[in-house]
Amino acid sequence: DMKVTQMPRYLIKRMGENVLLECGQDMSHETMYWYRQDPGLGLQLIYISYDVDSNSEGDIPKGYRVSRKKREHFSLILDSAKTNQTSVYFCASSLSRGKDTQYFGPGTRLLVL
Amino acid sequence: AQSVTQPDARVTVSEGASLQLRCKYSYSGTPYLFWYVQYPRQGLQLLLKYYSGDPVVQGVNGFEAEFSKSNSSFHLRKASVHWSDSAVYFCVLSGNNYAQGLTFGLGTRVSVFP
């Protein structure tokens, strides 16, 4: 069963704390993505990973970094979280780049106080 | 630059009625177009996609969409909706600049009433 998992599903942090969001996929997909979803803004791309240790900035990378040490695992890190990073974060994966279908995880709701 | 516009933020329909959700895109090349659906508190799921060929594509759960290059549109339709179709529907474009990932419309929230 093709699946993208995200942990944790819900997270509350204080401003200035570090945040680690984890994403896994069991499809051996090359490409993985991190998006955030905000009301009125839709989904915005934070980072793309084309494979292990091959990452590229998306539209809104400021304040975020990523790590991909294994093909099936992609992490999003917020160093010193800010209140404007309160959002719902989605991870996705696709077989390769471009027109391939993206498979989305269930999302992580992050609240930064 | 590429963009997707969904002009209707909210649509309300009665169960059993037909549904059409509008999508307009802007892209200079050949677009790859998708419709995704998001149920409450869930991630996005693919309904259908268009790459080339027959402009009418069939998707899951009775949904279909029609691509029009002349109108730069990719409208989604369903002949008879069910209450379980209540969700947010996203029109999505993928261009040839793979570094951009997908370009999402803002979504249309569909509410189906009995």
Image (cartoon, helix red, strand yellow):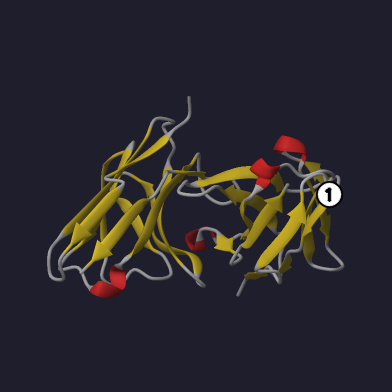
Which residue is most to the top?
A1
Chain letter of the residue carrying label 1: B
Instruction: Please say whether residue A48 is visible from this viewpoint.
Output: no
Which residue is most to the front?
B114
The residue beneath circle 1 is B17
Depth check, front residue: B39 or B24: B39
Q: Is residue B74 above or below residue B82?
A: below
Q: Residue B108, located in which quarter of the rendered image?
A: bottom right
Residue ID at (21%, 58%):
A12
Residue A15 coordinates in the image, percent (x, y): 16, 71
Instruction: Please say whether residue B36 is visible from this viewpoint.
Output: yes
Disc 1 residue type? Answer: Ala
Residue A60 coordinates in the image, percent (x, y): 38, 71
Q: Quadrant of the N terminus of chain B?
A: bottom right
Residue ID at (64%, 49%):
B86
Residue A47 coordinates in the image, percent (x, y): 37, 60
Q: Is residue A32 above or below residue B103?
A: above
